[in-house]
Image: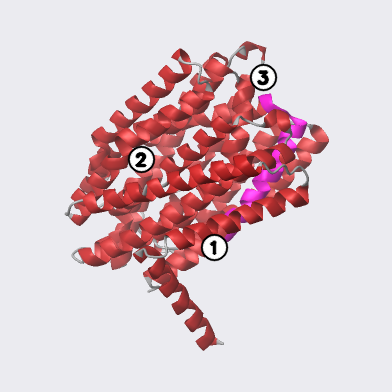
Amino acid sequence: MVSRKKASFQNASVAFITQTIMMIGQFAVQTVFVHTLGSRYLGANGLFSNLITFLSFAELGIGSAFSYALYKPLADQDHSAIASIMNLFRKVYNAIGMIILVAGMALSYFVPWFIHNGNKFPHIRLYFILYLLSTVVSYFFTYNRALLIADQKSYIDSFNQFIFNCGRYVLQIVFMIFFNSYIAYLILMILSNFFSNIAITGRSHKRYPYLKTMHQDEVDPVILAKIKHNVVGTISSKVGAIIVTGTDNILISKFLGLALVGIYSNYSLILTSITRLLNQVFSSVIASFGNLGVTERENKKKQLDMFDQFTYYNAFSVFFIGLVSFAFFPPFIKLWLGKSYQLPESTVFFIVINFVFGQFRPALNMVNAYGLFWGYRVKSIVEAVVNFGLSLALVKFTKMGIDGVLFGTIIGNILVNSWWDPLILFKGAYHTSMWKFYGKYWLYLSLFGSLLFIEHLILTAVNISVTSLVPVVAYGLAVGVIVLAALLVLFSRTKGQKGLFIMAGNIVQRLRHRG
């Protein structure tokens, strides 16, 4: 059996490399998209993504509940239980795919309503239906990914997505340049998702051949009851996640216009790509926490030590990205797309703060690892109401514009997520007080806030203007080095950073012995 540390390192490394290359590919596609199809189509893409997020409510967080149910059978190598769970998973996801398809076809009629002067956008319903199909095809095969990830083999899924997505990027660029076709862009999304899921299904069945021979077995009633219990808990979690992540572009589109959605989507593409990279890396580690939770349930000290280490990784990576982005966004967007695609500095500030609050949530990652979904049955509804209410009020009744939408999400994170996530984790998994962690959480955020303020003062005083490729790249590298050095110094006395250096030293020693 592969050790948790080795599996985490292998999965995280492959995820980081493949996701980084795919992120570059996305930038290339976005660049061609802007110059061939324009900001209006770009805004439509962002709006479609948010509307599909609402439709995915039908999934109700079932995937997370099934993934957690697989941890113990995989640890025990109980093939019969694994096959029965996966068979039920397949049936449920097939039904969900059909529900989303029917609901999406009905929603397509109302798509113009979500767009300012939407009736003047030709073929908008057809475009939405094609975008819908690219999501629907995933539900008929994606459950096989969950098994590989739960078995600490997410590197296989990372390679799969890398191959098919890179192929799609190349073809999308070709069709946009030579045919200026948004329809071809969408059809390639459908085909890429379809064949990627077919391929991962084949890999899964080859690695777990018993899935075909034992799939008629019924799920153990105890496991089934646990799955149902967790699904009920994730319903409200799904509602909260959809409203929090799915309303920003809709509010901007409805009150401020589709063109602004397109401009904002360039910034969100960068941070979404980075977020996806972080999630790939962190999810590679989460499976190891899930395995630890079922195999060493009573060893709370070890679990808390690992969580402390994970909190450091989460803080360091998110703060580094946030600080570099704040300095790098203005010259990069201007060079990449032009001055007309730039947002004001105040908006960039809110974008970065929103990113940090949304991604520095170590307790949330552990809640998923330990299967504590029941704790979200009330919390996420409160989060959704607070977030949507604040964002709607600020964009409608103030002159903050897009800043108001983002500020509403930030306040929602502070009022609800900052304390409720760790409460669920420490009460449900560690059975100890969360206040020591909560103090560290705000200490970390205070550190970030101080660094961001200092960075703003320095950038204002220096007022560097870089406009061509080489100076912009050099500027970005310089900012990255300075931010990295500052964080290493400020985190130098933490247990997390000391643990990281110890682990790195052990890896170097092993490599030397092999050599």
Q: Identify residue type, mark 1.
A: Val
Which numbered disc, 3 or 1, marks the residue closer to the eye?
1
Q: Is residue 18 visible?
A: no
Cβ atoms at labels 3 and 1 below 8 Å apart: no
Residue lying farthest right?
178
Identity of the residue drawn at 43% across and 39% down: 94
Q: Is residue 180 visible?
A: yes
Where is residue 510 drawn, in percent x and y? 48, 82
Q: Work out whether mark 3 precedes mark 1 in sequence or the reverse, and give the earlier one.
A: 1
- Please give the residue where the numbered disc 3 appears in the rendered image: 123
Vertical arrangement, residue 468 with respect to residue 477, above or below: above
- Please give the residue where the numbered disc 2 appears in the rendered image: 61
Vertical arrangement, residue 24 with respect to residue 30, above or below: below
Q: Identify residue type, mark 2.
A: Gly
Quadrant location, the N terminus? bottom left
Residue 14, which numbered label? 1
Where is residue 33 drawn, in percent x and y? 72, 35
Residue lying farthest front?
461
Quadrant assignment, res 266: top right
Where is residue 4 drawn, in percent x and y? 37, 69
> Which residue is nearer to you in this view: 352 or 176?
352
Q: CA distance from mark 3 to mark 2?
A: 32 Å
Q: How many marks?
A: 3
Does 147 appear in magenta?
no
Q: Identify residue type, mark 3.
A: His
The answer to whether residue 124 is left or right of residue 138 is right
Identity of the residue drawn at 76% across and 42% down: 467
Magenta residue span:
17-40
